[in-house]
Amino acid sequence: MPNPWTGKGNPYTREEVRERLQATLVKKKAIIGAGAGTGISAKFIEKGGADFIIIYNSGRFRMSGHGSTAGLMAYGDANAVAMEIGEFEVLPVVEEIPVFCGVHGSDPRRRMWHFLKQVKDMGFSGINNFPTHSIVDGSFRNILEETGMGFSKEVEMIQLATKMDLFSCVYVATPEEAIQMAKVGADTIIAHVGTTVGGSIGVIGATVDMDFAIKRTQEIIDAGRTVNKDIIFLAHGGPVNTPEDVKIILKNTDAHGFVGASSLERMAVETSLTELTQKFKALTL
C-alpha cells in the first residue's frame, strides 16, 4: 500500500493502518510501536521491524540527554516540535511503516481541527495524544481540568481525528479514561503506567511495580472493551522496559503489544555508545 505520489508508505488511511496491525495479530505476533526523536532512530527502528513510529516532542529532549518528562513542561511548543521532527527528520527517511504525530490536544492556542488538517497534510498516518495530561495527578491535574486544559480536550481531539479519518493511538492512565477514548473512536489504547524506569535518566523511586502494571493494564483493557471489543490495546511505561518485561505483561494481560520510547530509542543509544566507546578505548599502541 505505498503512497502513489512518493512510492513510500505514508500517509495511510485509517483503515489501512488497522489492516496492517490486524495482519500482525493474525500472525500471532506482538504489535510493537516505537518513539523516534531523530531521523536515524526512525530509520533503524523501521529496519528492526517495528509496526509503527510515534513522534513525541519528548523525543527531542530524550535524545538531547534529558528526562522524557521535559516533554510535559513549558520548554517549547510541543506541537511545533513534533511537526518539525516529522517534516525534516523522520518522514523523509521512513520507507514504509506508518508514522503517527504526538499532538498536544489541550494547547489552548490551537484550533485543533485546523492543526489536525496540517498533521494530515504533512503525511502522518495517525495521531497520539502527547504530551498527555492523563499522567498528571493531584492538585495540578485538578487545576488543568477546571481551567479547560485537561484530559477532556485530548478526548475532543481524538473525536475530531476520527471524523478526519486519522488513525488514533492514545494514552490513558485509568479505566475511566479508556472508556472516554473508546467512546470517541480511539483505534488503539495504550495503558500508560508511568515514566519508564532504567538508564541514566529513567526514574527509580517514582514508579510502580510490575504487579500494579499488570493489574492496571488489564483494568484499562477490560474498561475499553465494554465500549468496543475491537480496540487494540498496548502496554507502556513504568517497569515495562525490556523485551523480558513486555513478555511478562503479554503473558499476564490481554494486551496485544507494546509501545516503547525511552525503552527503545534512549536505552539503545546509552548501551551501544557506551560499549562501543569502551571497545575503542581498550585499544593499545
Image (tube, rainbow, N blue to C red):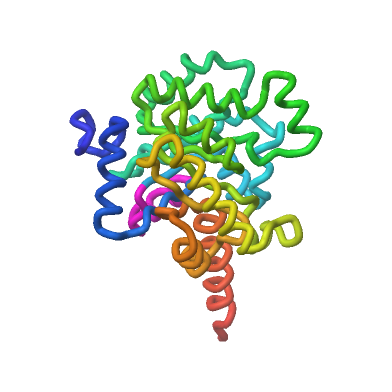
Q: Residue at x 40, y 53 (%)?
A: 256
Q: Residue at x 65, y 34 (%)?
A: 133
Q: Would you identify the image quadrant in which residue 203 lies?
A: bottom right
Q: Residue at x 38, y 37 (%)?
A: 91
Residue 219 pos. (x, y %): 55, 49
Nearest the eye: 191 or 216: 216
Q: Is residue 137 left or right of residue 199?
A: right
Q: Compared to 24, does 187 lie above or below?
A: above
- Check the image and name the residue furthest to the bottom: 285
Q: Residue at x 44, y 42 (%)?
A: 225
Residue 13 pos. (x, y %): 29, 30
- Check the image and name the residue furthest to the front: 226
Residue 51 pos. (x, y %): 35, 50
Residue 87 in sight here: no
Q: Is residue 223 left or right of residue 68?
A: left
Residue 28 pos. (x, y %): 29, 60
Q: Is residue 38 left or right of residue 210?
A: left
Q: Quadrant of the C terminus?
A: bottom right
Residue 236 drawn in magenta: no
Number of marks in the image?
A: 0
Our reading of the magenta stretch's main secondary structure is helix
Question: What stretch of residues is rendered in magenta?
Answer: 38-51
Q: Quadrant of the N terminus?
A: top left
Residue 260 in sight here: yes
Q: Compared to 10, does 111 lie above or below?
A: above
